Image (cartoon, helix red, strand yellow):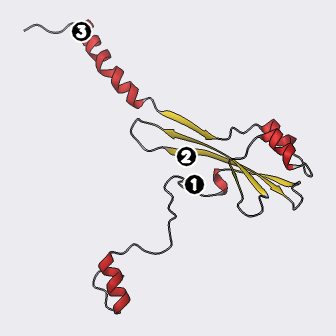
Amino acid sequence: MRRPSSLARLAVLAIVSVPLAACVGGEEFHRGYVTDERAVNQVTKGMSADKVLETLGTPSTVSTVGNRKWYYISQISRRPVQFMREQVIDQRVTAVYFDKNLRVERVALYGLQDGKVFDFISRSTPTGGEDQSFLGQIFKGTTTLNPFGA
């Protein structure tokens, strides 16, 4: 029986490792507003909203009441291996607060450590209640006896 040469082993190893390397390479995703520290530093107290638009551009989102808070949101997430879930590694929110005359009151910078990351796409908010089955809810509503748990 003939043993494969080291060159043949190397060729097989190369053929097998190329597709595997494509899955393990990992990816980094940058989403949202790209923070420019120089531009943010140019926003000063008393600056008009129009000037802020010129300096920072269109905000990612604006407060729904009064249009007096503008948020510039950026997020970096990483997926170490193809087909795995992404994990947020950095999130920055630049908030510009305006007074009633739409002049800058203050600028605040928030990072990942300042808040909890939540999924913008799922359109659902976790509640403090517990998940119960349909029958469990019926029994809980009609009697104090609940054979299905809490």
**Residue 74: image location, x then y, percent:** 65, 44
Q: Which residue is mark 1?
A: 117
Q: Which mark is residue 133?
A: none
Which residue, as the protein is rendered here, is positioned at the far left?
A: 1
Q: Which residue is mark 3?
A: 8
Give the left or right position of residue 119, taking residue 32 as reference: left
**Residue in front for this viewpoint, 77 or 105:** 105
Label 1: element kind: loop
In the image, residue 115 sits, relative to residue 128, either above or below, namely above
From the image, which quarter does the N terminus lie in? top left
Q: How many marks?
A: 3
Question: How far, Cα to Cα, is label 2 from label 3?
Answer: 42 Å
Residue drawn at x 39%, y 72% is 131
**Residue in front for this viewpoint, 115 or 69:** 69
Which residue, as the protein is rendered here, is positioned at the far bottom?
A: 143
Residue drawn at x 50%, y 45% is 87
Which residue, as the protein is rendered here, is positioned at the far right?
A: 46
Q: Which residue is mark 2?
A: 88
Q: Which amino acid lies under the numbered mark 2 shown in the image of this protein?
A: Val
In the image, residue 46 sits, relative to residue 14, either above or below, namely below
In the image, residue 34 sits, relative to residue 141, either above or below, namely above
Q: Are marks 1 and 2 in contact (CB under 8 Å)?
A: yes
